[in-house]
Amino acid sequence: MQIGDCWFDAQEHLLVDASGCRWILSSDEYQVLSVLAKHRGKVVSRFELTQLLSSYVKGARRCDDTLDDVIKRLRSILGKKPYSLLDTVRGEGFILYPSSVSINHKLLDSPTYQINPLQFALIILVTLIALCGIGAHISHPTQIAPNYSQQIQKPNGLASEVKFYTGQYYCTEMKSLVEQMMGQIEACAVFPWQSVAANISIDRKLISFILRDNRENGLKFQTIKLMSDNFMSDTSQPDWLTLAGICS
Protein backbone atom coordinates (compact mmCIF):
# COMPACT_ATOMS: atom_id res chain seq x y z
CA MET A 1 0.00 0.00 0.00
CA GLN A 2 1.44 3.34 -1.06
CA ILE A 3 1.47 6.03 1.64
CA GLY A 4 3.04 9.19 0.28
CA ASP A 5 6.60 8.35 -0.74
CA CYS A 6 6.61 5.17 1.36
CA TRP A 7 5.36 1.63 0.71
CA PHE A 8 3.50 -0.10 3.54
CA ASP A 9 3.98 -3.87 3.46
CA ALA A 10 1.22 -5.13 5.74
CA GLN A 11 2.28 -8.76 5.52
CA GLU A 12 5.90 -8.16 6.47
CA HIS A 13 5.14 -5.28 8.86
CA LEU A 14 7.50 -3.04 6.92
CA LEU A 15 7.67 0.55 5.75
CA VAL A 16 9.96 1.18 2.80
CA ASP A 17 10.85 4.80 2.03
CA ALA A 18 11.75 6.33 -1.35
CA SER A 19 15.45 5.58 -0.86
CA GLY A 20 14.72 1.89 -0.32
CA CYS A 21 15.39 1.97 3.40
CA ARG A 22 13.31 -0.69 5.19
CA TRP A 23 11.78 0.04 8.57
CA ILE A 24 10.56 -2.88 10.65
CA LEU A 25 7.44 -1.84 12.56
CA SER A 26 6.78 -2.91 16.10
CA SER A 27 3.45 -4.48 16.95
CA ASP A 28 2.14 -1.15 18.31
CA GLU A 29 3.28 0.77 15.24
CA TYR A 30 1.84 -1.80 12.89
CA GLN A 31 -1.58 -1.87 14.62
CA VAL A 32 -1.89 1.94 14.68
CA LEU A 33 -0.68 2.42 11.10
CA SER A 34 -3.04 -0.30 9.84
CA VAL A 35 -6.07 1.47 11.32
CA LEU A 36 -4.93 4.87 10.05
CA ALA A 37 -4.24 3.46 6.58
CA LYS A 38 -7.64 1.79 6.51
CA HIS A 39 -9.29 5.15 7.16
CA ARG A 40 -6.96 7.31 5.06
CA GLY A 41 -8.23 10.86 4.67
CA LYS A 42 -10.52 10.49 7.71
CA VAL A 43 -9.99 11.32 11.36
CA VAL A 44 -9.41 8.36 13.65
CA SER A 45 -10.20 9.22 17.24
CA ARG A 46 -7.53 9.01 19.90
CA PHE A 47 -9.92 6.92 21.98
CA GLU A 48 -10.18 4.29 19.26
CA LEU A 49 -6.40 4.02 18.97
CA THR A 50 -5.83 3.81 22.73
CA GLN A 51 -8.52 1.12 22.95
CA LEU A 52 -6.63 -0.76 20.25
CA LEU A 53 -3.44 -0.62 22.30
CA SER A 54 -5.15 -1.41 25.61
CA SER A 55 -5.66 -5.03 24.56
CA TYR A 56 -1.99 -5.71 25.26
CA VAL A 57 -0.80 -2.55 27.10
CA LYS A 58 -2.06 -2.27 30.68
CA GLY A 59 -3.02 1.10 32.13
CA ALA A 60 -4.72 4.09 30.48
CA ARG A 61 -1.73 6.35 31.10
CA ARG A 62 0.64 3.84 29.52
CA CYS A 63 -1.68 3.54 26.50
CA ASP A 64 -1.61 7.31 25.99
CA ASP A 65 2.17 7.45 26.31
CA THR A 66 2.59 4.48 23.99
CA LEU A 67 0.30 6.06 21.40
CA ASP A 68 2.27 9.32 21.49
CA ASP A 69 5.52 7.40 20.99
CA VAL A 70 4.03 5.43 18.09
CA ILE A 71 2.76 8.58 16.33
CA LYS A 72 6.13 10.26 16.77
CA ARG A 73 7.93 7.22 15.35
CA LEU A 74 5.61 6.92 12.34
CA ARG A 75 5.99 10.60 11.54
CA SER A 76 9.77 10.31 11.55
CA ILE A 77 9.57 7.40 9.09
CA LEU A 78 6.95 8.87 6.76
CA GLY A 79 8.97 11.98 6.05
CA LYS A 80 11.12 14.82 7.34
CA LYS A 81 8.07 17.10 7.43
CA PRO A 82 6.29 15.28 10.24
CA TYR A 83 2.92 16.95 9.75
CA SER A 84 2.69 16.45 6.00
CA LEU A 85 1.21 12.93 6.05
CA LEU A 86 0.21 12.18 9.64
CA ASP A 87 -1.54 15.13 11.22
CA THR A 88 -3.06 15.76 14.63
CA VAL A 89 -6.63 17.00 14.82
CA ARG A 90 -6.75 18.80 18.13
CA GLY A 91 -9.33 17.41 20.53
CA GLU A 92 -10.30 14.57 18.16
CA GLY A 93 -7.49 12.32 17.01
CA PHE A 94 -5.24 11.75 14.00
CA ILE A 95 -5.58 11.69 10.22
CA LEU A 96 -3.34 9.95 7.68
CA TYR A 97 -3.28 11.52 4.23
CA PRO A 98 -2.79 9.25 1.20
CA SER A 99 -0.20 11.67 -0.20
CA SER A 100 1.69 14.73 0.95
CA VAL A 101 -0.49 17.80 1.42
CA SER A 102 0.45 21.39 1.98
CA ILE A 103 -0.99 22.74 5.18
CA ASN A 104 -1.35 26.50 5.36
CA HIS A 105 -0.50 27.56 8.85
CA LYS A 106 -2.06 30.72 10.19
CA LEU A 107 0.29 33.39 11.44
CA LEU A 108 -0.49 32.77 15.10
CA ASP A 109 -0.84 28.97 15.00
CA SER A 110 2.51 28.51 16.71
CA PRO A 111 4.62 30.77 18.92
CA THR A 112 7.69 29.71 16.93
CA TYR A 113 6.18 30.30 13.48
CA GLN A 114 8.31 32.71 11.45
CA ILE A 115 6.89 35.14 8.91
CA ASN A 116 8.64 35.93 5.68
CA PRO A 117 9.83 39.46 4.80
CA LEU A 118 6.82 40.13 2.56
CA GLN A 119 4.38 39.31 5.36
CA PHE A 120 6.38 41.47 7.76
CA ALA A 121 6.36 44.41 5.33
CA LEU A 122 2.61 44.01 4.84
CA ILE A 123 2.01 44.06 8.61
CA ILE A 124 4.11 47.22 8.98
CA LEU A 125 2.27 48.88 6.09
CA VAL A 126 -1.16 48.05 7.52
CA THR A 127 -0.03 49.30 10.95
CA LEU A 128 1.18 52.61 9.53
CA ILE A 129 -2.06 53.11 7.58
CA ALA A 130 -4.07 52.38 10.73
CA LEU A 131 -2.00 54.83 12.78
CA CYS A 132 -2.43 57.54 10.14
CA GLY A 133 -6.17 56.94 10.12
CA ILE A 134 -6.38 57.14 13.89
CA GLY A 135 -4.22 60.26 13.98
CA ALA A 136 -6.45 62.00 11.44
CA HIS A 137 -9.46 61.53 13.72
CA ILE A 138 -7.76 62.69 16.92
CA SER A 139 -8.57 66.31 17.54
CA HIS A 140 -5.91 68.59 18.92
CA PRO A 141 -6.47 69.88 22.46
CA THR A 142 -8.45 73.08 22.61
CA GLN A 143 -7.63 75.71 25.19
CA ILE A 144 -10.76 77.25 26.68
CA ALA A 145 -10.39 80.87 27.69
CA PRO A 146 -11.94 81.87 31.02
CA ASN A 147 -14.81 84.34 31.08
CA TYR A 148 -13.12 86.23 33.88
CA SER A 149 -9.46 86.27 34.93
CA GLN A 150 -7.54 88.40 37.39
CA GLN A 151 -4.12 88.52 39.06
CA ILE A 152 -3.98 88.85 42.85
CA GLN A 153 -0.87 90.09 44.61
CA LYS A 154 0.02 87.95 47.63
CA PRO A 155 1.75 89.39 50.73
CA ASN A 156 5.01 87.66 49.76
CA GLY A 157 5.05 89.59 46.50
CA LEU A 158 4.05 86.67 44.29
CA ALA A 159 0.98 86.84 42.09
CA SER A 160 -1.90 84.38 42.08
CA GLU A 161 -4.28 83.93 39.19
CA VAL A 162 -8.01 83.45 39.66
CA LYS A 163 -10.13 82.31 36.72
CA PHE A 164 -13.88 81.91 36.42
CA TYR A 165 -15.48 79.78 33.72
CA THR A 166 -19.16 80.30 33.07
CA GLY A 167 -19.46 79.02 29.50
CA GLN A 168 -21.21 81.12 26.87
CA TYR A 169 -23.87 82.06 29.38
CA TYR A 170 -22.62 85.24 31.09
CA CYS A 171 -25.65 87.30 32.06
CA THR A 172 -25.87 90.16 34.54
CA GLU A 173 -26.62 87.83 37.48
CA MET A 174 -23.63 85.65 36.63
CA LYS A 175 -21.39 88.70 36.33
CA SER A 176 -22.58 90.01 39.69
CA LEU A 177 -21.84 86.65 41.36
CA VAL A 178 -18.35 86.49 39.84
CA GLU A 179 -17.53 90.06 40.86
CA GLN A 180 -18.77 89.43 44.41
CA MET A 181 -16.63 86.30 44.80
CA MET A 182 -13.63 87.94 43.17
CA GLY A 183 -13.80 90.85 45.57
CA GLN A 184 -13.98 88.49 48.55
CA ILE A 185 -10.99 86.46 47.33
CA GLU A 186 -8.94 89.65 46.88
CA ALA A 187 -9.72 90.58 50.48
CA CYS A 188 -8.39 87.29 51.90
CA ALA A 189 -5.89 87.84 54.71
CA VAL A 190 -3.94 84.77 53.62
CA PHE A 191 -4.38 83.28 50.16
CA PRO A 192 -2.28 80.07 50.04
CA TRP A 193 -2.92 79.13 46.41
CA GLN A 194 -0.93 79.91 43.30
CA SER A 195 -3.96 79.62 41.05
CA VAL A 196 -7.70 79.07 41.36
CA ALA A 197 -10.00 77.90 38.58
CA ALA A 198 -13.74 78.09 39.25
CA ASN A 199 -16.44 76.66 37.03
CA ILE A 200 -20.00 77.92 37.57
CA SER A 201 -22.95 75.95 36.23
CA ILE A 202 -25.46 77.70 33.98
CA ASP A 203 -28.16 77.66 36.65
CA ARG A 204 -25.64 79.09 39.17
CA LYS A 205 -26.37 76.30 41.66
CA LEU A 206 -23.03 74.48 41.46
CA ILE A 207 -19.50 75.88 41.64
CA SER A 208 -16.39 73.72 41.29
CA PHE A 209 -13.05 75.10 42.48
CA ILE A 210 -9.67 73.64 41.50
CA LEU A 211 -6.93 75.01 43.76
CA ARG A 212 -3.25 74.66 42.87
CA ASP A 213 -0.10 75.58 44.77
CA ASN A 214 3.59 74.92 44.13
CA ARG A 215 5.20 73.85 47.40
CA GLU A 216 8.60 72.56 48.46
CA ASN A 217 7.44 68.94 48.40
CA GLY A 218 5.75 69.34 45.01
CA LEU A 219 2.47 70.53 43.58
CA LYS A 220 -0.64 70.44 45.73
CA PHE A 221 -4.12 70.26 44.24
CA GLN A 222 -7.46 70.51 45.95
CA THR A 223 -10.95 70.29 44.50
CA ILE A 224 -13.98 71.87 46.14
CA LYS A 225 -17.60 71.62 45.03
CA LEU A 226 -20.24 73.94 46.44
CA MET A 227 -24.00 73.72 45.92
CA SER A 228 -26.57 76.37 46.72
CA ASP A 229 -29.93 77.60 45.49
CA ASN A 230 -28.79 81.20 45.98
CA PHE A 231 -25.04 81.79 45.95
CA MET A 232 -25.48 85.57 45.98
CA SER A 233 -27.08 85.30 49.41
CA ASP A 234 -25.12 82.37 50.83
CA THR A 235 -21.75 83.87 49.88
CA SER A 236 -22.55 87.42 50.88
CA GLN A 237 -20.27 87.05 53.92
CA PRO A 238 -16.60 86.27 53.12
CA ASP A 239 -16.24 83.69 55.92
CA TRP A 240 -17.40 80.99 53.45
CA LEU A 241 -13.98 81.19 51.81
CA THR A 242 -12.27 80.16 55.05
CA LEU A 243 -14.77 77.36 55.69
CA ALA A 244 -14.21 76.04 52.16
CA GLY A 245 -10.41 76.19 52.51
CA ILE A 246 -9.87 78.77 49.79
CA CYS A 247 -8.62 81.37 52.26
CA SER A 248 -6.72 80.79 55.50
Image (cartoon, rainbow, N blue to C red):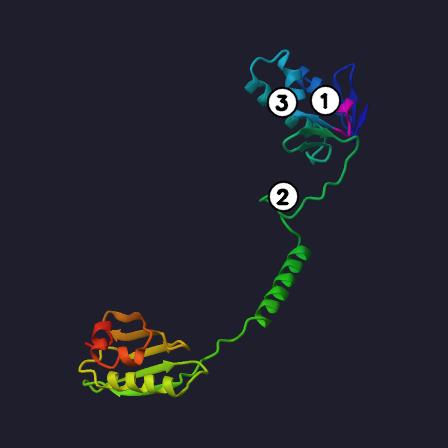
Within the magenta stretch, is there residue 175? Answer: no
What is the residue that sits farthest to the right in this orientation? Answer: 1
Task: Compare marks 3 and 1 and give the one earlier in the sequence.
Answer: 1
Question: Amino acid type of disc 1?
Answer: Leu
- Mark 1 element type: helix
Q: Nearer the viewer, residue 143 or 197?
A: 197
Q: Can you identify the residue that label 1 sits on? A: 33
Measured Cα–Cα span from mark 3 to mark 1? 11 Å
Whether pointer 2 and pointer 3 mark residues with C-beta atoms closer than 8 Å, the reply is no
- Mark 2 element type: loop
Whether pointer 3 and pointer 1 mark residues with C-beta atoms closer than 8 Å, the reply is no
Crowd rating for badge 2 (residues with CA inside 10 Å; few <14, some 14–19, many 20+): few
Question: Amino acid type of disc 3?
Answer: Leu
Q: Can you identify the residue that label 3 sits on? A: 67
Is 99 above or below relative to 164? above
Q: Where is residue 155? Give x, y as percent.
A: 18, 85
Q: Residue at x 73, y 20 (%)?
A: 35
Q: Which residues are magenta?
A: 35-42
